[in-house]
Image: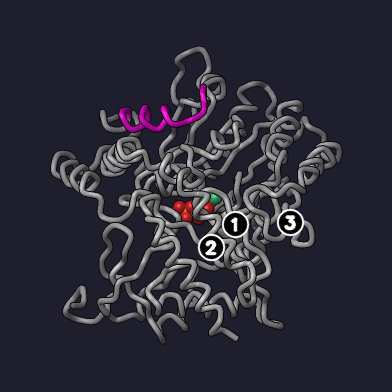
Amino acid sequence: MTSQATPPDLSHLWMPFTANRQFKERPRLLARAKGMYYTSADDRQILDGTSGLWCVNAGHGRQEIIDAISKQTAEMDYAPSFQLGHEGSFHAATAVARLMPEGMDRIFFTNSGSESVDTALKIALAYHRARGEGQRTRLIGRERGYHGVGFGGISVGGISPNRKTFSGALLPHVDHLPHTHDLSKNANSRGQPAWGEHFADELENIIALHDASTIAAVIVEPLAGSTGVLVPPKGYLEKLRAITEKHGILLIFDEVITGFGRLGAPTASAFFGIRPDIITMAKGISNAAVPAGAVAVRREIHDAILGAAATGIEFFHGYTYSAHPLATAAVQATLGIYERDGLFERARGLSQAFEDAAHALESSRHVIDVRNLGLVAGIELASRDGAVGARAAEVFGKCFDQGVMVRYTGDTIAVSPPLIVEEEQIHHLFQTLGKVLDTVA
Ligand code: PLP
């Protein structure tokens, strides 16, 4: 059964982050989703090894979320969030705040990770300005970082294809830390690599160059996802925290992927036991049933920006769809499922089996590194001469044909299944990948 009677005309849609011409020559269309599986338009079952796009953490088609959204859309489809509110937005903010590290309980709603990142960067600038340190405008990101596609996000981000076309228009006053990946030292680390804490020392050099008084914030993904799963070396994030704190620089953790259970904890911050100043979120916050994102902020930061007196709008920022009623309904239902079903604990319980299954691929053809933490793994392949990404693209396509959905960036295959995954599905995922690797030149 196909999803619609008439096959679609593929020419009008300009697809995001897609090789449009190749896709349209050989489309891969998804039609339905339930639990751990997609159903393709040609009626094949596809095991979801990537939670959609790192976002469907509770699995597909959850009835509680469907009911919450349906009820909300009938009751009130939309409410403006500027100078007006609706109860669901406050309930949702309270539910998100409960999952954040202590004291990070002021929540700003957005619609995506990119919006969360730009919001967080603006909050950092507004905070310093409110404290009379408006000269702190410099932002520090990291090589290979992915922070979405807004101008703020690509400026602090470190993925060159995402930046080069727009390089003349990136934010000024941005610097980058080195990334933490060194295969010669850390190949096939299980969990956090033992070597590499010293990469954080480069922040002291950057501070020495620009002076701390010019720097507003450092933004990193605690575990870098989109660039191909880079796990932070032991001690590295702790050092970043210590250095930023010493110099009055805000530390932003971009938890768009790591938030809501990916590492077996509500946040990576909780998993690593580090409290940043600002956390960005999206994806798993609503199980991706409605686009949603959020920024959690330390209470002192929020209070500094609001100031002491009631003088009008304190922060000139927000979106038409900030705290959209459907989104906040989805957020509440999603967070309810995570709690009721104990999905973060479940992910933590599965992470050893997941690690073992991933590392069983160490000796597979083309594999040069396996990296993992929680329910995320990266399997890096040797690149073909002059064709970075071609091998992984072929593996991705063949896995899809075999009924398993993985992702790839460059020549790294990423696996990050919904937290409801069963152990035998984990084995099936990695075994299929292993078999496909044998068939690829
Ligand atoms: N930040 C991180 C760490 C991400 O992984 C992503 C998306 O993958 C984003 C930001 C951007 O999120 P969105 O695509 O929802 O704008």
**Residue 374 position (above or below residue 360):** above
Q: Position of residue 194 (x, y in %)?
A: 73, 47
Q: Position of residue 58 (x, y in %)?
A: 34, 49
Mark 3–mark 2 distance (CA, rounded to whole Å): 18 Å
Q: Residue at x 17, y 47 (%)?
A: 70
Residue 114, can we see it? Answer: no
Q: Position of residue 221 (x, y in %)?
A: 60, 46
| First-in-chain label (1 vs 3) | 3
Q: Which mark is residue 114?
A: none
Location of the C terminus by quadrant is: bottom right
Read off the residue under disc 2.
Answer: 414
Contact, mark 1 vs mark 2 (Cβ under 8 Å):
yes
Of residues 19 and 285, the one nearer the viewer is: 285
Range of residues picked out in magenta: 90-102
Q: Which mark is residue 186?
A: 3
> Under tag 3, what secondary structure?
helix
| First-in-chain label (1 vs 2) | 1
Q: Residue at x 64, y 21 (%)?
A: 131
Read off the residue under disc 1.
Answer: 229
| First-in-chain label (3 vs 2) | 3
Contact, mark 1 vs mark 3 (Cβ under 8 Å):
no
Amino acid beneath label 1: Val
